[in-house]
Amino acid sequence: MACFYEKRCYITDRELKPLAYFDADAYIAACGISDDGSVALFQTANGPSGEVTMLIDANTFSTIAAGAVPVSANSVRGINVDSTRKKFTLFTAKKRETEWSEKHGFTFSLEPTVPADEPQEIPDYGAMKAAERMGIPYEEYAAILKKARDEVESDDSWEKELDAKNRAKAGIDGPDAETFEKDAERLRLYKEKTDLSPYELLEKAQVCMDELKENYTELTEQKAAGYLRLSALNPKMSAYQLSNAYKELGQIYDRNELKQKALDAYREGLRLNPALSVKKRIKQLEKELNA
C-alpha cells in the first residue's frame, strides 16, 4: 500500500507495516499505487521544488520518475496507476468540488497522453467473496452495497451521534450555537479573502518560514504570519498542524532575538494545542520580558 503523513511517503504491506519510507521537501497531497502493488505514485503540494509527482518502484524502492505535471495536486480527487501499460491517470475537479470531473493521462516518463487512457478496471475481490459466501450473484450484492452506502452518505446523523459520544467520553463540551455562529462567520471571512485551501496557505507559510531560516526579512516574516492567520480562519484547518507551525515561527523569532513575537507565537500554538511542548520556553520568555 502507499500512504503518507505530512512530508513523509510510506510503502507498506497489507497490514500497514512500513516496508520503506522517504521524505519529500513539501507536504504530500495525494498518493496511489498500482493494483499489483508494484508502482506507487506520490504528489507534493507546492514547495521549494514546486509541485512534484514521483513514481516509485515498490519492489526496489527506487525512483522511476520525478518531476512536474500540468495538474495541481490540490485538484486531484483520484489516482489510477497502470503498471502494465506504464501509464497513470489523475482524476481532477475544480476547487471546492468533491467529485472528479476531468481525467488526465500520463506515461511513466511524465509525458501527457491525449486523450487520457481509460483506467484499469480493478475487481472488487472482497465484494466478490462476500457475494459467494451469501450465495447471491455479485451484481445483486454490489447493488445492495451501493444502496447502503448511498443511505449512509445521505444521512450524517450517525456521525453527529458518534461525535457527541466521543466528546462525552473525553469530557469535552459539544459546540453550542454561539460556536457554530462564530465558525460560520470565520468561514465567511475566509472565503472573502482567498480561494486557496487552508492547507495550501499553510504550505505557503512553510515556504516563507524556510526562507526566514536562511535570511530573516520583515517582508517574508509578514507573509508567513499572514498566511498562518488566514489559514486559521477556516474552521476545518487542523489545529494540531497549525500549532506546530506557530511553534516553528516562534523558534524563528527566538533565533532572531524577537522575544515578544516569539512569546506571542508560542502562546498561539499552545492555545491551539494545549499539549504543545512550549510551556517551559513561554515561562522563560515571560520572566525575561518582565525582568
Image: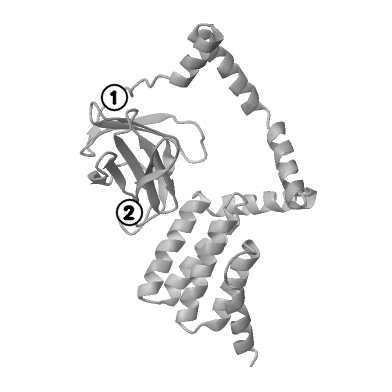
User: Quarter-wise, where is residue 213 in the image?
Assistant: bottom left
Name the foreground residue: 155 vs 140. 140
Amino acid under disc 2: Gly
User: Considering only order in the chain, which callout, 1 or 2, is on the residue closer to the N terminus?
Assistant: 2
The number of numbered badges drawn on the structure is 2
Q: Residue at x 70, y 32 (%)?
A: 158
Amino acid under disc 1: Asp
Image quarter in which the C terminus is found: bottom right
In the displayed structure, would residue 273 be above or below residue 70? Answer: below
Give the x, y percent position of residue 200: 46, 52
Judging from the image, what secondary structure is the residue with disc 1 in? loop
User: Can you see residue 33?
Assistant: yes
Furthest residue toward bottom: 291
Residue bearing the label numbered 1: 117
Q: Residue at x 74, y 42 (%)?
A: 165
- How many angstroms separate mark 2 from mark 1 (CA)? 26 Å
Give the x, y percent position of residue 254: 49, 80
Give the x, y percent position of residue 228: 53, 62
Q: Residue at x 54, y 6 (%)?
A: 135
Name the foreground residue: 125 vs 187. 125
Image quarter in which the N terminus is found: top left
User: Can you see residue 45?
Assistant: no
Name the foreground residue: 136 vs 242. 136
Q: Which mark is residue 50?
A: 2
